[in-house]
Image (cartoon, rainbow, N blue to C red):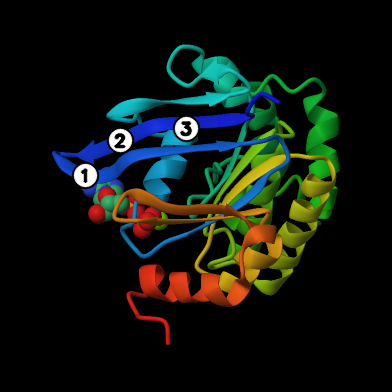
Amino acid sequence: MADFLTVNNLCKEYEGRRALHKVSLSLQQGDFLSLFGPNGAGKSTLLRIIATLISPSSGQVEIKGFDLQEEPEAFKRQLGVISHQSLLYGHMTARENLLFYGALYKVEDPQQRADELLRVVELYPRRHSRVSRFSRGMCQRLSIARALVNDPSLLLLDEPFSGLDQYAAAILTRQLDELRTRARTVIMVTHSLDRGLAAAGKVGILAGGRLLYLEDRDTIDPAAFEGLYLEHVHGARAA
Ligand code: ADP
Ligand code: MG
């Protein structure tokens, strides 16, 4: 089976300082990769490159055979991104935000999709309110809807639970389960070993800009993995 996502020898330097070094990985459609690593490891850099928010210094990324640099439009249509940035417009209503992204992604029936997602994140009654009036939790929920507007075949999650209130976290967990049942591919960067392992089909560790480890969740011994996690992510030696 052809790979769904291929990352090949990806490197990134910021003003001459190396943030990613020769990162290669491949995922099949429906894989759920939980990626761990210490602060400054390059996790956000990797996700931001795949999300087309920044360019790599060298290397290639392909989704379903679409090359990031050669076919950026087709590449981008596959993507959904959840990070600390909500990517919402305060002067627009909740529904207008989703319609805006729906148009950007050329969603078939943006109105229907917007209403469907507003119900999923339980903001339908507030659909005509401006986002600048929303609480933080409401913005979090709307940004989950925003990321899903194009029914992405690859969802990129950069520490998606940090800062989420319990209500938004429950909605996100439900949506991730739902995506899994439809064989959507997910890369989730997380600091939570428990949450990451519970969700994952594959687990990876990135440290110092290098992918040190990438294995199937089923083949790892949880205790041994916890040792690796402590060693590489927290800089502590396992007992
Ligand atoms: P992580 O998400 O794993 O904490 P990042 O990808 O944010 O790591 O950062 C990797 C390295 O790149 C760090 O040393 C960080 O300081 C550096 N870095 C990240 N973004 C920039 C930037 N825009 N300009 C300069 N250096 C950056
Ligand atoms: Mg980060």
**Depth check: 9 or 123 in front?**
9
For mark 3, give the secondary structure.
Answer: strand
Residue behind mark 3 = 7
Number of numbered discs visible in the structure rendering:
3
Q: Residue at x 78, y 46 (%)?
A: 179
* Label 1 packing within 10 angstroms: few (<14), some (14-19), many (20+): some
Residue behind mark 1 = 18
How far is the residue under mark 3 from the one under mark 2? Answer: 10 Å
Which quadrant: the N terminus? top right
> In this orientation, does residue 135 appear?
no
Q: Residue at x 81, y 57 (%)?
A: 122
Looking at the rendered image, the disc whose residue lies closer to the viewer, 1 or 3, is: 3
At label 3, the amino acid type is Val
How far is the residue under mark 2 from the one under mark 1? Answer: 8 Å
At label 2, the amino acid type is Cys
| Ligand 1 under 8 Å from disc 1 Cβ | no
How far is the residue under mark 1 from the one under mark 3? Answer: 17 Å
Say whether disc 1 or disc 3 marks the residue closer to the N-terminus.
Answer: 3
Determine whether label 2 and label 1 are within 8 Å by CB.
yes
